[in-house]
Image (cartoon, helix red, strand yellow):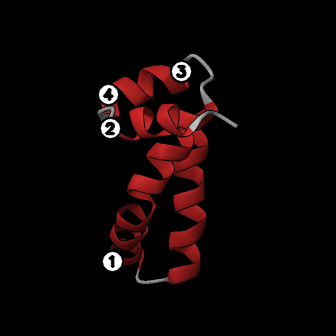
């Protein structure tokens, strides 16, 4: 687990830089992106599908693709 100072630094990086880090295999950057956007992605998908279970599955697929 990274030191607290490192975690705070990663938390302040913008999404574009985090995506570049994820592309290079940085799991912590992925976790930060997931934490930042999980709720908004699920809300959007819930409105689009009108089905919470489908929205949850689609949200998982979105973040899986980001991670890959």
Residue at (40% x, 76% y) in the render = 46
User: Rounded to the nearest whole Å, what is the CA distance between mark 2 and mark 3?
Assistant: 18 Å
Q: Earlier in the sequence, mark 3 or mark 1?
A: 3
Tag nearer the camera, 4 or 1: 4
Residue annotated with mark 1 = 47
Q: Which corner quadrant holds the C terminus?
A: top right
Q: Earlier in the sequence, mark 4 or mark 3?
A: 4
Residue annotated with mark 4 = 16
Residue at (33% x, 32% y) in the render = 13
Residue annotated with mark 3 = 23
Q: Position of residue 25 (x, y in %)?
A: 63, 22
Helix, strand or loop at label 2? It is loop
Q: Up-down: is 46 above or below 28?
A: below
Number of numbered tags placed on the structure image: 4
Helix, strand or loop at label 1? It is helix
Q: Is residue 66 visible?
A: no
Q: Is residue 26 visible?
A: yes
Q: Decide: few, some or many residues near mark 1? Use Cα within 10 Å; few <14, some 14-19, many ≥20.
A: few
User: Rounded to the nearest whole Å, what is the CA distance between mark 4 and mark 2?
Assistant: 12 Å
User: Rounded to the nearest whole Å, what is the CA distance between mark 4 and mark 1?
Assistant: 26 Å
Residue at (53% x, 21% y) in the render = 23
Tags 3 and 1 in contact by the CB under 8 Å rule?
A: no
Q: Earlier in the sequence, mark 2 or mark 3?
A: 2
Disc ID at residue 15? none
Q: Up-down: is 13 above or below 51?
A: above
Disc ID at residue 12? 2
């Amino acid at each position: 687990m990274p030191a607290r100072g490192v975690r705070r630094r990663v938390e302040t990086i913008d999404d574009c830089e985090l995506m570049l880090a994820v592309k290079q295999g940085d799991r912590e950057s992925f976790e930060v992106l997931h934490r930042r956007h999980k709720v908004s992605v699920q809300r959007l998908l819930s409105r689009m599908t009108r089905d919470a279970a489908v929205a949850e599955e689609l949200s998982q697929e979105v973040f899986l693709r980001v991670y890959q």
